[in-house]
Image: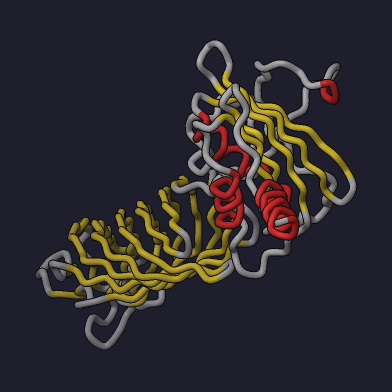
């Protein structure tokens, strides 16, 4: 009997030692979660997520491949405030340095999500690691003895879209997003083969455009005005002794798509162009060219490439193929004999710079 009683007493003692800690009378539970990316002691009411859930969110946030991790020990105390909000005090121990964060949220789920984000940021190894980057939050709960006389701040490098929506924080800092849409102006030199007689003809061009960016994909619209100054047609085998001055203006609109690789972008464009070219005689040739202005439209196809020199400055290179809907012509003043006719297609090349704003 004595041996059986001793055995039963030993088993009872082992069972008591192995039993989990029961919640207190106030409904709160204190749990220590096994270490993963971080070791967490989670002291929160029973209505809040468990410590394992918080650590699971931490592991999900820091699970990016190749990301270095640091050992972090965290202790969180969560309270329900009289106004219905939830308040937390989070003590972080990082490489022997202790830092306390205090914050509040509208629900305990949101507060637990915020705590997971803060712990995950502490786990990440920064280029100059001292403590997690600051994200300020109003402190509405009672101060702990270790935090009196100062207002600690919370840190987050996440964008507003990634942060818990119900976390009531002010003065939060985040990395600005890349502009998804941006206006730019451009100017370039342009050369034409096929539109102006006796090509090539050299001109200047200016434009205003808008571009959107989505990762490596690019798109946008561009409007341009080109001017080709006086270009002379001299005597040739078809119209001996005819001399004329030609100048041209064209207005074009393009829609473009592209792909970015590092600082380089390349892609096709398609659009429409309106051309106006004026011709008049010059000199004292035996025959005179009839002065007239001709207008026509053209279908425009382009390939553009750019190199980003700085954040707002780019070098542009573009080639165009223009196909006119009408082949306008110019003739002599007295007998209307044809002297020059616009080609069935023309090629252009442009090189210049663009500045975004």
Q: Is residue 16 left or right of residue 239?
A: right
In terms of depth relative to the viewer, which is nearer, 353 or 312? 312
Quarter of the N terminus within the rendering: bottom right
Q: Which quarter of the rendering shows the C terminus?
A: top right
Q: Quadrant of residue 314?
A: bottom right
| Residue 64 image point, x, y percent | 59, 63
Residue at 65% from the left image edge and 40% from the top image edge = 21
Q: Residue at position x 35%, y 70% from top? A: 268
Give residue 250's position: percent from left, percent from top.
Answer: 31, 57
Looking at the picture, the colour scheme in use is: secondary structure
Q: State left or right for residue 203 relative to residue 339.
A: right
Looking at the image, is 9 positioned above or below residue 307? above
Between 216 and 308, the one nearer to me in the picture: 216
Q: Name the residue rendered at 27%, 61% in the picture.
A: 279
Does residue 296 lie above or below 185 as drawn? below
The front one of 155 and 284 is: 155
Residue 113 relative to residue 218: left or right:
right
Residue reaching furthest top? Answer: 82
């Amino acid at each position: 009997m004595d041996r059986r009683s001793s055995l039963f007493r030993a088993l009872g003692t082992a069972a008591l030692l192995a039993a989990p800690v029961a919640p207190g009378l106030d409904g709160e539970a204190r749990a220590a979660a096994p270490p993963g990316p971080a070791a967490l002691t989670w002291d929160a009411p029973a209505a809040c997520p468990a410590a394992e859930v918080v650590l699971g969110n931490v592991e999900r946030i820091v699970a990016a491949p190749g990301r270095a991790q640091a050992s972090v020990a965290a202790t969180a105390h969560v309270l329900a405030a009289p106004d219905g909000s939830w308040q937390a005090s989070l003590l972080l121990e990082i490489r022997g340095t202790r830092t306390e964060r205090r914050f509040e949220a509208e629900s305990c789920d949101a507060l637990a999500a915020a705590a997971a984000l803060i712990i995950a940021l502490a786990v990440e190894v920064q280029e100059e690691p001292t403590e997690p980057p600051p994200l300020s939050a109003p402190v509405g709960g009672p101060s702990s003895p270790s935090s009196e006389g100062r207002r600690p701040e919370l840190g987050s490098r996440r964008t507003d879209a990634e942060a818990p929506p119900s976390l009531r924080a002010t003065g939060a800092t985040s990395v600005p997003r890349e502009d998804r849409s941006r206006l730019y102006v451009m100017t370039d030199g342009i050369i034409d083969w096929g539109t102006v007689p006796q090509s090539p003809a050299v001109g200047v061009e200016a434009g205003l455009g808008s571009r959107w960016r989505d990762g490596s994909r690019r798109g946008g619209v561009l409007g341009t005005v080109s001017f080709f100054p006086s270009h002379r047609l001299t005597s040739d085998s078809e119209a001996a002794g005819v001399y004329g001055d030609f100048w041209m203006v064209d207005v074009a609109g393009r829609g473009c798509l592209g792909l970015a690789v590092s600082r380089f972008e390349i892609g096709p464009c398609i659009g429409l162009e309106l051309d106006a070219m004026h011709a008049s005689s010059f000199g004292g040739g035996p025959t005179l060219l009839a002065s007239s202005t001709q207008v026509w439209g053209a279908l425009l196809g382009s390939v553009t490439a750019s190199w980003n020199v700085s954040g707002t400055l780019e070098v542009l290179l573009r080639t165009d193929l223009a196909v006119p809907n009408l082949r306008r012509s110019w003739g002599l003043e007295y007998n209307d004999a044809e002297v020059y006719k616009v080609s069935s297609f023309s090629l252009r090349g442009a090189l210049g710079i663009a500045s975004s704003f």
